[in-house]
Each structure stands twice: as structure tokens, then as C-alpha cells.
Amino acid sequence: MKLQQLSLFLENRPGRLDAPLETIAAEGINILTLSLADTAQFGILRLIVREWDKAKRVLEQAGWVVNLTEVVAVDVLDRPGGLAAVLKILDGAGLNIEYMYAYSLRRGDKAILIFRFEDPDRAIQILLDQGLHVVDGDELMSFAAA
Amino acid sequence: MTHESRPWIMPVPNPSPDWSSEHPIWNPIAETLPRAEREALQLERLRELVGRVARVPFYRDLFAHREIGPHSIRSLADLRRLPFTTKDDLRRQHPLGFLAVPRRDLARIHGSSGTTGKPTFVAYTAGDLRIWSELCARFLVAGGLRPEHTAQVAFGYGLFTGGFGLHYGIERVGATVIPAAAGNTRRQIEIMRDLDPEALICTPSYALTIADAARELGMDPRALPIRFGHFGGEPWTEDMRREIEDQLDIAAFNNYGLSEVIGPGVSGECTARTGMHLQEDHFLVECLDPETLEPVPEGEPGELVITTLTREAMPMIRYRTRDIARLDRGPCACGRTTTRMSRVAGRTDDMLIIRGVNVFPSQIEEALLRVEGTTPHYLIEVSRPGTLDEVRVKVEIHPEIFSDRMDRMQAVRDRISREIQTVAGIRAHVDLVEPRSIERFVGKARRVLDTRGLNERES
Ligand SMILES: [Zn+2]
């Protein structure tokens, strides 16, 4: 149920994002979603792509330092209080969220959030116990294609 | 001339090491002299030296000008009344202007590598060669060599002092030498497999080349017969020591010397490995601030300045080595009483003065090593945007320290800053940069970019 996320180190200067994205695009790899965390000097680009192993290889060949992390996608009602309800559950279970970001596509009245947990397996168990819907890789892909 | 007429050679008694001891000392008398006795010996030799170097026109003129003679040396502190000798002085007296003995008394002539100009020659009498072997024997034994061992010397034999210096040192210990000389790495490995030497003698980088070559031949370098190595002839780091020890499964010892004063044998490590024991019955070693030429507080890094107490052919008064190291006069677990010097941490040529603080690229390297466990590519940028110097250290990201978490990345950057503050005593901005974004040059990497316009440095 976990998703493989690629992270890249980038210096924070104009146009710096283009090069890795072009490298992936040139290989015909689809980017499902991306998020950029940055400071004034550097940034961390996080990507979820269809073929993460191929993407990792071509990026590394092009000289990038690439990290692979497991993240968890959860769908949430896209209305006021939807996110708060999920956060409350996670908080109540004592789960630490390292960071989170929204998936680029929505499904009807649902938005998808990507979470980076310290312990993703435990997080998935708790989310499922609480009746939340954890979106796995295939589902995420299929719905991107839809 | 007989040796009896040269009293400065003699006060070292013949060694009688106790081979049954776990950590034998090659010359148990000279290497464990109480401080007061050693200083008395040094003073006697220094006074005699000042009289003797008057045969060198360079010193004769300087001494005459300053009215210096043996009478000027009443205590070791009077060393500071004597002039310095620099590499440029040696070049100006090219080829053999520093001889203190007639040419016919020479037994050998070596030369420096001449990377920074034309080579300088270094001459030895038979007495100098005897002492040189003795000094090499001392550090070889301190670092594990025994008479029953075989040592493979993979140093260049030639004008360079490394090969012959170590060769005769090994013979002096009574061990077996394989003079394999530098190069032909496959052959080195074949010799090792055929002859089972316990010791490898070469530059630290060549030790790693041997390990690489063994792997290329499909062998495990750890399975090679060597058990320890004495490495020198170029600066290296603790990081490199760990690499060598890990890749070859040996104990790696450091030794120090420079051809201008004798060659290898000025100092070397014992098994405690807390610095290299200086052979103070033959060298007076000062540690000075390279700008002010005042002694640095003990334990602080400074330029080593060496006076040769017993060299006959080419004695040196206060030779400025340009090597930066720290001195430790505290006791050593091995029982030797001599001062220990740290690894050479840099060259004065590389020194940066930042807001009045002397900083060496090697200190930045040490800070990076502490944080990352390895030395990444880095560049020190020094500028002066207003009236104050500003330092920016660019550090290339590599997989071991990269994290997808921003807090971790910021923590790495902050730790590097703090370590630089601790090691080098300066505040630096740390920029984490993309891999391969710092320009590489053939041979040496450029470590410093100083745009203050005060001095042009390329290092
Ligand atoms: Zn010791």
C-alpha cells in the first residue's frame, strides 16, 4: 500500500527544476505528482512517477543524488474539516508526520494527500483501522489515467 | 677526518633494543631521555652547530652581520636569535652553496621533487647517512618492524629521498628489504604473494592503488600477506588511514620528513598513534605562527621550523618547512619522551587569514569529515563585501547525507557550520550544492577561491 517517492537535491536558482523534469520526460516517464520544499539556498524535489526504478536510474545517470522513500496516500473529503479530521486521527494515534502534500488530481469530492511518516507500516494499519481509505500504487496510477 | 673529530655524531650510544618487549624501542637511551638531559644535549649540539655552519657563506655573512657565534647560545631560547632559512635561500645557493664540508667528503646527493621550481640538491656525508638510517630505524621499529620481518619498499628509488632512506633504515633494523621501487602495481602484488612481506613501505595513495589493482585482478586485497605499512612522502588524512586499513586489513603508520633537512625520519608514529615522535636529539623543532614568526601556544597549529643539530654536509638553521602541524610535549603511552607532532594539516602557502584568524583548508576538511564521515568535494570562497571578510563553504551533496526531509538537510548544514566554528574558529556560511557542481581541475582540486584581492592563491 506504500508508494515509492523519489527525492532530489536541487540548488535554489531560477530554472533549476527544469533539468530533472526534462530528464524524466525524455524517457517518457509520467510524473504523477511533485512537490518542492525549499529554503533560500536549496530545495528538495519530491516526485511520484509511474516507473520509479527507471526514473531513479536515469536521474542518477544524469548526476543527481536521488533518494527513495516510502510514502502513504490517503483520500480525504475535499471540504472544510476534511483534512482536520484525518490529522486528528493521526495525532490521536501518536503518529509523526514528517511532511505531507496534496496529490495533483482529485477524485469527485475527494482529495488525495501524500504523507511521509516515520513508520509507514504502522501508519497504514492505524488509518485502515479508522476506516480511512489508503490509496495504493495501482489505484493512484489508474486514476491518473482516467 | 675521523668521526672522533666530529663529536656531534657520537653522543648517541649504540642501540640495544629489548626485542622481548611488546613495544620495543630501537634506541632506548636516545628515545627516552628525560627532558632536562635532552635539552642539555640539544644545547651542546646547537652551540657546536653555530660554530660549524660558519663554513657556509650564507650563514657566515648573516652571523657576521648580527654578531652571532657559539658564544651567543647560552640557552635553547637563544635559538630565536638565529636567522631563518627558506626554500628560496636554498634555490639562490643552487646547486651546492650550502655545503659545510669539502665536496670530497660527500657520500651521496639527493634532490627535492622540485614541484614549485627547479630542484634543490641535498648532500650527505657518510656520517649523515648513518644517522639517517638510525632515524628511519627508530620509527620503523616504533611502528612494528622487527629484525625477522620482510619489508617491501614501493617508493621511488632515485633523487627522491623516500626509497633509499627507508631502504637503509630497514637494513639497519636487521630486517629483509625487497627494493620493489615504485610502479608496476601488478608486479608489486606478485612479489607480495611470492615473498610474503609483513610490511609495505610507500606513499599512502600508492597503498590504495595496490588495493585497487588487487581487486582488478580478482583478488581480495585483505588477503595480501602484508600486516602493516609505513606511509609518508605526501600529506594524507585520518580518513585515508581508515580506507587503507580497511581495504588492506593492515595497520597504517604515518612518518614525516623532508629532503631539505634529511628526508624521512624526522618523526614517525608509535603504536599509540597519537602523533609522530620527533627525533629531538637530531632536530630542534619550533612551531611558529607563520605571519608573526612567534611561537604558537602549545597544541595550536603552526609552521614547523627545523634546525638540524647533527647534519654534517648541509646543516640547516631554522629551516621554514611551510608545513603546518601541532606539537604535543605530553607523555606518550609507549614510553618515549620525545615531543610528538600531529599529521601535517596543511601548507603555509594554503593559509588564509580570515578576520585575523589563520585558517587552513585542511581544517575545513576535518570539520566536514566529522559531520559526514568522509570528505566531500568542497570549495572555500572568501570575499570582503564590506570591511569584513566573509567565508562561504560550498559542499557537494552526496547520497550518504541526502535526505528527503528538510529538517535533516538543515541539520546537516548547521552541524557543518558548528564544526567549522569549532575546528577553524571562524563563522562560515555553508551552502549545500548539487553533486559535480564544483569545478574539477586535472590533478589538484581547487579548494579556495579568494576574491578579496589581497593575494592571489591557487591551491
Ligand atoms: Zn609513543
Image (cartoon, coloured by chain):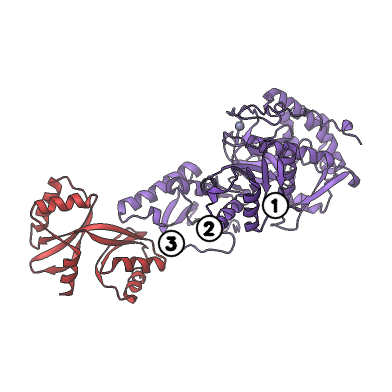
Chain colours: A red, B purple
Q: Which residue is located at x 58 percent, y 40 percent?
A: B301
Would you say the residues marked 3 and 1 are in contact, meaning their CB atoms lie under 8 Å apart?
Answer: no
Q: Whole-Å distance between the Cαs marked 3 and 1?
A: 39 Å
Please tell me which of labels 3 and 1 falls first in the chain: 1
Q: Name the residue tied to disc 2.
A: B218
Residue closer to the observer: B421 or B128: B128
Q: Nearer the viewer, mark 3 or mark 2?
A: 2
Judge left or right: residue B450 versus residue B268. left
Picture quadrant where residue B280 is located: top right
Q: Which subunit holds the residue at mark 3? A: B
Amino acid type indicated by mark 2: Gly
Amino acid type indicated by mark 3: Pro
Q: Which residue is located at x 68 percent, y 45 percent?
A: B321
Question: In the rendered image, is residue B424 in sight?
Answer: yes
Amino acid type indicated by mark 1: Ala
Please tell me which of labels 3 and 2 falls first in the chain: 2
Q: Whole-Å distance between the Cαs marked 3 and 2?
A: 31 Å
Q: Name the residue tied to disc 3.
A: B435
Tell me the element at label 2.
loop
Q: Position of residue A32 (x, y in %)?
A: 23, 69
Up/down of A56 relative to B160, above or below: below
